[in-house]
Amino acid sequence: MSESESSKSNIPEFSVSELAFSLKKTLEENYERVRVRGELSRVSIASSGHMYSSLKDENAVIDAVCWKGVLSKLNIRPEEGLEVICIGRISTYPQRSNYQLIIESIELAGEGALLKMLEERKKKLAAEGLFDLKCKKDIPFLPQTIGVVTSPTGAVIRDILHRLQDRFPRHVLVWPVLVQGESAAEQIAAAINGFQTLHNHNQPKPDLLIIARGGGSLEDLMPFNEEIVIRAVANSIIPIISAIGHETDTTLIDYAADLRAPTPTGAAEMAVPMRSNLIAQILDDETRLLSGMNRMLLETKYKLEAQSGKLIDPLKLLEIHVQKLDHLGDKITGVFKHYISRKQKNIIEVGARLHTPRDQLLDAQKTLARWAEQLSNLTIKITKDRKQKLSHIGNMLEAYSFENILKRGFTVIQSSDNTLITEAGQAVSGSHIKIRFKHNQYVDAVFGKKASSLNLKKPKKIKIKKNKTDDNQISLF
């Protein structure tokens, strides 16, 4: 065995996985906690909630991962192009032979980066119309109930309540929230939204909201720059006064609110008027109103007196109207007399055209006599016509009577109960029958054969024999 081959055999042999995980362990042991400054790039939130991105500067790039549990606790929201300082550990992803930074916390790399981020967010929200002046609501002059969103333990709420008590005491509802920290933005947004539906829980709905906190650094005021808070303020149907920090502090909530106060105390002053000033103004207005009314009454009195001096004596005015009334009375009397005279003339003319009752009675009698004569002639004519028609019918009845038929040699055969026999089948052999001739003459006979045995086609000649017992009865045998 050669010396080179012997030296090669002393090099330890690794599998790919062993080498990859050995490197992973070495990096994690030597770079267990590092602080890296750079610009966030390729920020992507997976459906699982984990964030995958990169940190870069002008010379290098390193992959970065922030797990879901850590991401939800960050004070800032990672955005593309944001310069940050990340604290975490170095590890590898063996499947791709990549090393990466596992982020445990993120902070902004200086105030300039934070201001840049806020400026970009401001432009974005302004483009959506959340800061439009036409969307601002009027602040009520004297709200009945005021809602305050702030920390319940700070000096801010005491300053607001004290200032309201001095100026004009009002009913105040406090919604306690965190004003800085991880969950502050969510609590502030929830409070604003909660006040919108407070009347559904048997609580008075505020007429005005004050969102306030004391001064602090730019990082401390960050909850009032978050989108969730800005959108809640813009969507509020209750007017909102923002009072964040000192007069020099500006947050994005100031642009979305309906009115910005320089301080929380200033917000209380804007919320209600000064009661003493209102009372003084009311008294001053009352004095001015009474003075104005007295002055108006005096001026009206002077005008009335001046006008009354120009009026004519009322008696003289009445004389003219009395004379006019008399003239109209005479005119009405003449018109009425003329009307009566014309009606009387019409009555006389109508009366002259009327007939006396006697004349009317004579006319009626003549008309009745004429009608009676016409009725008599009509009755005679109708009676004559009816007699002629009756005679004609009698002649026809006589001509078609069966007596005339008997006279022509025909007979009528009847049974013993006077029922007419019109068919041979109606007679029974040995039954008595009657044969009727003209002049109402009858002959009694006995039918000798059954009706069923008779030859209807060739009837036999019936011989009439006198019966010894009865000369009037004949036999058909």
Image (cartoon, rainbow, N blue to C red):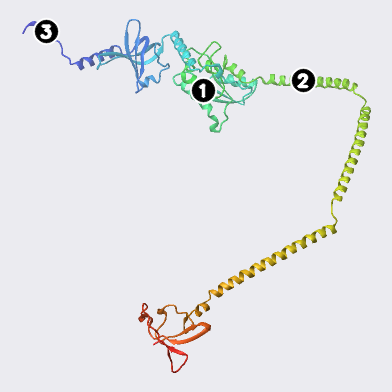
Left or right relative to 398: residue 118: left
Quadrant containing the N terminus is top left
Q: Is residue 221 visible?
A: no
Give the residue pinned by disc 2.
287
Task: Choose top left, top right, bottom left or bottom right for residue 391.
Answer: bottom right
* Residue 377 vertical placement versus 439 (above, below): above
As drawn, 162 above or below 110 = below
Circle on res. 7: 3
Give the Cα separation between the discs numbered 2 and 3: 115 Å
For discs 1 and 3, the disc positioned in front in the rendered view: 1
Q: Secondary structure at mark 2?
A: helix
Looking at the image, the residue that sits furthest to the left is: 1
Residue 323, percent across and down? 93, 31
Which mark's residue is nearer the viewer, 1 or 2?
1
Number of other residues with Cα within 10 Å of mark 3, as a class: few under 14, some 14 to 19, many 20 or more: few
Which circle's residue, 1 or 2, is located before the other in the chain? 1
The spot of residue 471 in percent (x, y) is 47, 92
For marks 2 and 3, the one nearer the N-term is 3
Q: Amino acid at mark 3?
A: Ser
Q: Nearer the viewer, residue 376 or 230?
A: 376
Disc 3 secondary structure class = helix
Q: Secondary structure at mark 1?
A: loop
Query: Label 1, on which residue?
Result: 235
